[in-house]
Amino acid sequence: MSPPAAAVVAARQSLNPFRLVAENRNFRLFWFGQTTSLVGTWMQGMAQGWLALQLSNNAFLVGLVAAVGALPILLLSLPAGVLVDRTNRLRLLLGAQSLLLAEATLLWYFTWSGGITIGVLLALAATAGIVSAVEIPTRLALIVELVGRDDLHDAIALNSSGFNLARIIGPALAAIVTSTAGLAWCFGVNALSFLAVLGGLALVRLPERPRVEHVGSPLDGVRELFHFVTTTRQVSALMQVVTIFSVFGIPYLTLMPVVARDRLGLGAGGYGLLLTFVGVGGLAGALLLASAGRRVARGRLLLGSSFAYSVLLILFAATRSPALARPLLLGIGLMMIINSALANGLLQTLVPEALRGRLMSAYSLIVVGLAQVAGSFVGGAVARAFGAQWAIGGGAVVMLAFAGVAAVRYPELRRL
């Protein structure tokens, strides 16, 4: 017997940010498996950046490793989105996660055996990028099948909370593993962590999704997406926000190893602690969104977080004090996740189901592909020429200017 409508509404107005995890079995399996796997992913991300710095001692090559890992996402995400809309998403995600497990295992082996070089690191990063071009939009588009449209905003916020919980635990665990067992075992733990998400996904049971007959070629499918984005003003505005804040916001994360060592005078442990502060802020932002539910004016909060995120990044770029950098990163993490989770949730609310996979592929193309290839590559080049502070601060100034333009040009964002 289904609960009365009033009880459902009351549940959705609950201040408990983890309500959906407790109530929805499929989402609970997905969330716990994904969060566990993301702990390993953050360990690998920290270790990979530090390994690139050790192998090359070159800020440009640190950025290049991140850019090469994202280039396939930039090139392949749109056709991958057509695949996501025309395929069983759960099975597709299981296959992609299995391939990422294999890539992490190879990275562990080459590092552990001493055979790792900057060339091997670049090749494995590119391999992970090819798989991620399919995995990311599949995972994002699957969420609505797990929870339904009414709980979509809360699910996206909770998904961000798992991401940031892993961002807290992963770097801290990576620092411990690196100091006790060696850098290679960060990659080994990541490989093992994929077993959690594969186990969780294997237990998910979804009703059959109504089959949609797709006519035309994959290229026609991409054209259909572009028509929707360019002719729907609110979606177009949100995609512009996502683009600017992803591309110009990414250098502070990509260049964190350089900032930690050369500007703040920290080692691997201090670098991991900086990432942990970003994660704590991000977790707080995600949980605040999940508990707020429909109480907040999401469009106004999106614009407010855009201004705050930009200003905090400018302040972080200017500091040389680890004691000041940590609370700034706490605020940056909070505003970054509020901004990105709101944009993602609003996009998924506005998109028709038949285009969901393709819109999420365009979203991942920007957030991961374009951000890493353009943002990380250019950020690395600027840091090499002028210093990391100019790469981070310059991008933040562009973000701040765009936030002002968007607030005036798109007043409808405030009504979302």
Image (tube, rainbow, N blue to C red):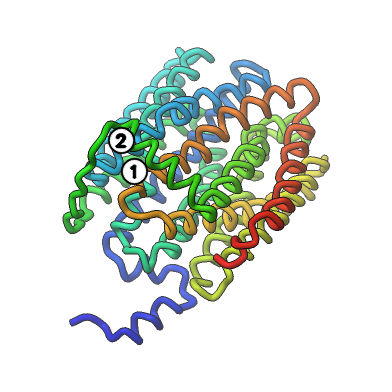
The residue at which mark 2 appears reads as 96
Q: Do labels 1 and 2 touch, CB within 8 Å?
A: yes
Q: How far apart are marks 1 and 2 (CA)?
A: 9 Å
Asked whether residue 328 appears in the rendered view, the answer is no
Above or below, comparing residue 276 to residue 386 in the picture: below
The residue at which mark 1 appears reads as 138
Q: Which amino acid does label 1 sit on?
A: Thr
Crowd around label 1: few <14 · some 14–19 · many ≥20 (10 Å): many
Task: Name the residue located 65 percent from the left edge and 41 percent from the top edge.
Answer: 249
Q: Is residue 391 left or right of residue 220?
A: right
Q: Is residue 370 left or right of residue 274?
A: left
Above or below, comparing residue 336 to residue 173 in the picture: below
Q: What residue type is labelled 2?
A: Ala
Mark before the other along the chain sequence, 1 or 2: 2
Above or below, comparing residue 210 to residue 12 in the picture: above
Query: 222 or 348, which lies in front?
Result: 222
Residue 212 % position (x, y): 21, 48
| Image quarter of the C terminus | bottom right
| Quarter where residue 379 is shown | top right
